[in-house]
Amino acid sequence: MLDFRVRFVTDHPLEFALRVLKGFKANQGLLLAGAVAYYALLSIVPLLIVTVIVLSHIIDRAELLLTVGRYLEWLVPGQSKALVRELDNFLVHRDVIGWVLGATLLFFSSLAFTVLENAMSVIFFHRVAIRRRYFLVSALMPYCYIVSLGGGMLIVTLVAGSLEAMGQESVSFLGHTWSLSGMSGVLLYLLGLGGEILILTSLYLVMPVGRLAWRHALLGGVTAALLWEITRHVLLWYFATLSQVSVVYGSLTTAIVVLLSLEIAATLVLLGAQVIAEFERGDAGKEGLRTA
């Protein structure tokens, strides 16, 4: 069956793309993306606060915030500095955080993952019709993701610090000296891109009910990551040159820009899921067999 699906996609790429867009529209993909973006906006600051407070006991605060700011720029282009300032202020007053506030932050941190799981269940409805996930698994999954993201941030911060230290070095050979700063910058970028692909692949592997082939999840993760890379550079150019959003929204500019960026990112993530779902259902493969 896999051969039939691959053959259909390669022989009829436009028809398959139209099937994906039709399915995305039928599933109200833009509405789902809006819901995911809204809850992601509610979750991003509490999630960052919880992560940074825990990791600040292990890593130097300045180094941690530098890494968070660098990779936040991938998610919310042009708005990372405002978020990092809020995180820094929260770290200064972290002693006032009690159990109630801590539990509240942890709860709001999980909302985006819960809504994303529900959105995935709509797109992969053919899986939900066969089997459903246990409530306890769905309840614990967001917190497992929070712990995993915290561990990933710890690793990335340590590796990024090593790469930045390497960038301050130089290599001398045959009387010529080459700075390693350029190589350090490339490796930092590849580190961020690899982390982005890994996170997206894990979402496609874990969020849908049942087990998804890792090749399909990896393909979806790479595709969504590359599309987002193109999109975020376009957003950076737009906000820097053409946008008048600060004139229109004033003090609400940061929230509006972050929400817009999150909605576009959520749309790409769900569109990637729709591609996997259409490929997985097998109807395309059967039609390809008939038209061969």
Image (cartoon, rainbow, N blue to C red):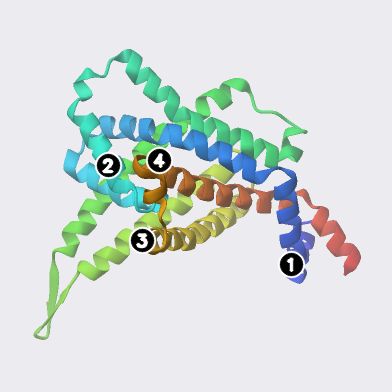
Q: Position of residue 199 (x, y in %)?
A: 47, 46
- Circle 2 sits in a helix, a strand or a loop, which is it? helix
Q: Earlier in the sequence, mark 3 or mark 1?
A: 1
Amino acid under disc 3: Ala
**Around disc 3, counting alpha carbons within 10 Å, would you say few (fewer than 14), some (14 to 19), or many (20 or more)?**
few
Q: Secondary structure at mark 3?
A: helix
Q: Is residue 241 above or below residue 160?
A: below
Label 3–label 1 contact, CB within 8 A: no
- What residue does disc 2 label? 84
Residue that label 1 marks: 14
Label 4 secondary element: helix
- Looking at marks 4 and 2 on the same chain, the residue that comes earlier in the sequence is marked by 2
For residue 22, side relative to residue 55 (left or right): right
Q: Is residue 218 left or right of residue 104?
A: right
Are the residues flagged by discs 3 and 2 in contact, CB closer than 8 Å?
no
Q: Amino acid at mark 1?
A: Leu
